[in-house]
Amino acid sequence: MPYIYGIHTSAQLDRLSSLLEEINGINPFQSTRLGNLTKAVDNESFVKLPLLTKRELMEDQINNPPFGSNLTYPLDYYSHYHQTSGTTGEPLRVLDTPTTWDWWGRCWLEVLQAAGVTKSDRIFFAFSFAPFIGFWSAYHAVSMLGAMAISGSGANSARRLEMIEATEATVLLSTPTYALHLAEIASQRGIDLTQSTITKTIHAGELGASIPMTRQKIEQAWGARALDHAGATEVGAFGIGDTKDCDLYVNEKEFIAEVIDSNSFMPIESGSTGELVITNLGRGAWPIIRYRTGDLVNPIRIPSGPMEGKLLLKGGILGRVDDMVTIRGVNIYPSTLENIIRSIIGLCEFRIIVSTFAEMDEIGIEIEGDQTTAQAVAQSISDEIGIRAKVRPIEKGTLPRWESKAQRFSDQRARRSNTKTP
Amino acid sequence: MPYIYGIHTSAQLDRLSSLLEEINGINPFQSTRLGNLTKAVDNESFVKLPLLTKRELMEDQINNPPFGSNLTYPLDYYSHYHQTSGTTGEPLRVLDTPTTWDWWGRCWLEVLQAAGVTKSDRIFFAFSFAPFIGFWSAYHAVSMLGAMAISGSGANSARRLEMIEATEATVLLSTPTYALHLAEIASQRGIDLTQSTITKTIHAGELGASIPMTRQKIEQAWGARALDHAGATEVGAFGIGDTKDCDLYVNEKEFIAEVIDSNSFMPIESGSTGELVITNLGRGAWPIIRYRTGDLVNPIRIPSGPMEGKLLLKGGILGRVDDMVTIRGVNIYPSTLENIIRSIIGLCEFRIIVSTFAEMDEIGIEIEGDQTTAQAVAQSISDEIGIRAKVRPIEKGTLPRWESKAQRFSDQRARRSNTKTP
């Protein structure tokens, strides 16, 4: 099987060459790390450039406050400020210029257009417009498209449901978790969302819309087509949801994708699982070259048909490198567990806690439901992946609900060595 | 003294003429109300057009859901949805197209530029990005200017202070009340905001930045220049803050201003107080013609000097027609009371309740502070406007804090007849 490694098209090579010319010698961060960049305009040199981790970006920002040194232009060229959610520590700050902000918009536009969104649509943002980049950039794309943008910020779930009804919104943008939460509130209030004007839901911010059972629950609850998207603050909106399956296409016009083994850093074979490494080609003001996303993917290149030649991430983002759990030699992703749990509990909430007991790794799961449901979940996990999980039923409404990135998975073991960045 | 009434410049006449041509016969709301609009291209016909009230817009929206009939184009031309805060009932929904959204941006750009904001500035939005139009349109203007926009949505006050420090923001956009609240939190945490990077604060959303003592408190707390702005969802950003005094200039490039007596609807003399009536000239997709803003103003036209010919609203927006209190024949505005109260209590919170006791109107004021302070407030009100107010001291931190439109004034008497719309 071929490797997914390095530059794939001559268009990518041209874009890369322009990018390197733009930043070479004037972006302090890139110059210090990589030296003379314009040398790296063929694939052989490109794949020899060092990989970049989030930790390096964070350290650069600490050493060069407040915005780090990954800046190609003087600070007053930059117009848009965003930051990561900071769930794993201090937020990382990223800056865009009007030019790279339009690039973000164009990347998101690909996602919207793949989903069939047109300027006649009315897009409801179930989002707080906090400085996370994801939905802000989607909002910019909606403006570029000329579709109607409706901010659902500053409102609770009940009010948001009222706004969707009042404005006859046709597209919902939210995290997968929040789409399920809105459905839960609607159900409590006797609202049948399958009768609403929403025909599409587009998701970002966390895994979920590519987990088959989660996607199915969203589609059933809303009577709408659910679509995934993948992106990251550091990188851009690189993944375009497939309308038929739980897969993502990589936007290879704007990104170079590589997939590596997180331990050896060697390229993996197409069809295996590895860590996605991204180079963005249109963000010269804040460029990212060979960035380890931490996302686990299973890449294949479509051999034929209308999508021939496209790079597909089978099942979307499968999990995070850091979240992979090895239990008695078996690699398990939280998303695999979510898929099994959702097939039993539907819209209800759950939480997974991995801990060590008597030197053995243990998976504990809390689900909102009764003892029978808990037993069914444990049985299903045992049947499908051969692992015994402790499943505990808890009262409905007691687990936290999430509007942005959900945190349902907690690894309470000592940190494993394979989570270290090189 | 001359009247502030009707079209003032030939440029306004040209703009009005284009606007009427754009909407004539195709905007159902305007056609039904006003008939053949293109006839109204001279001042004589213009000032005979009927005045428009918010109630009419609301009723039109109820009769023609969800967006009413004040639409010049088919719905899928509209790209931006906003709504009023709905403090006095259901929210009014307003729509803009990309063209009129840029018009909003240009109107706000005048405010920013008058304040001396440049593309080197970093503008911190202490705002929730709920669907209120004010700061969304300011955000668009900041993008047009190319200055750095920083969303402070989804964060509490302490976190916002950290973000301002971390990003070295230079301009704060907030309600006047919230600027004072942030200063209160900073003071509790031992942060000296006069040492912060903020050099300007720009305000919207409520009266305050034109109330001399409130403005002075904001300027003292932040060590920065505070500037006012005035606008309304229905109308646009029509008022540009004066950098030296607590006044506003009307943007007569984009608006026609008239000032009338709220009872007789006759124009008032320059230098008297009356209700501001606005026609916007650049929002053809959702036009407003002779709209009663409900804002009380004291207009004068600058006779000489660098601002010669400009229309000045002395003291900014003085109050709301509905909020004027008549106590034993004396007209009192909440803003007058706020100015007196702030001169005594500084940054603390207060609340004014007007009620009827034994058929007499009564002003009750709660202030966060001690008995001595309360007595000083009562004395000062008595000295300055000859009215006896009941001032009650209450514990610090017990009154509500406001991020958007503050509601410190409550009229609990039966509604007066002069608040009726024609």
Image: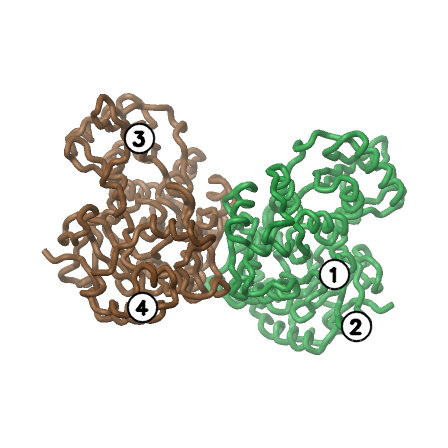
Chain colours: A brown, B green
Name the residue carrying label 1: B244
The vertical placement of A346 against B77, above or below, is: above
Cα–Cα span, label 2 and label 3 = 71 Å
Residue A20 image label: 4
Cα–Cα span, label 3 and label 4 = 42 Å
Chain of the residue where label 2 is placed in the rendered structure:
B
Disc 3 residue type (three-letter): Gln
Q: Quadrant of the N terminus of chain A?
A: bottom left
* Residue A206 percent location from the top left of the image: 34, 45
Which residue occupies 69% across, 76% down? B13
Whether callout 2 and callout 3 share a subunit is answered: no
Name the residue carrying label 2: B305
Name the residue carrying label 3: A412
Disc 2 residue type (three-letter): Gly
* Residue B376 percent location from the top left of the image: 83, 36
Name which quarter of the figure residue A339 lies in: top left
Q: Of residues A71 and B80, which is closer to you in this image?
A: A71
Q: Residues within 10 Å of mark 1 (few under 14, many from 20)?
A: few
Which residue occupies 61% across, 56% down? B233
Tell me if B63 is positioned left or right of A342 in this view: right
* Residue B249 percent location from the top left of the image: 72, 64
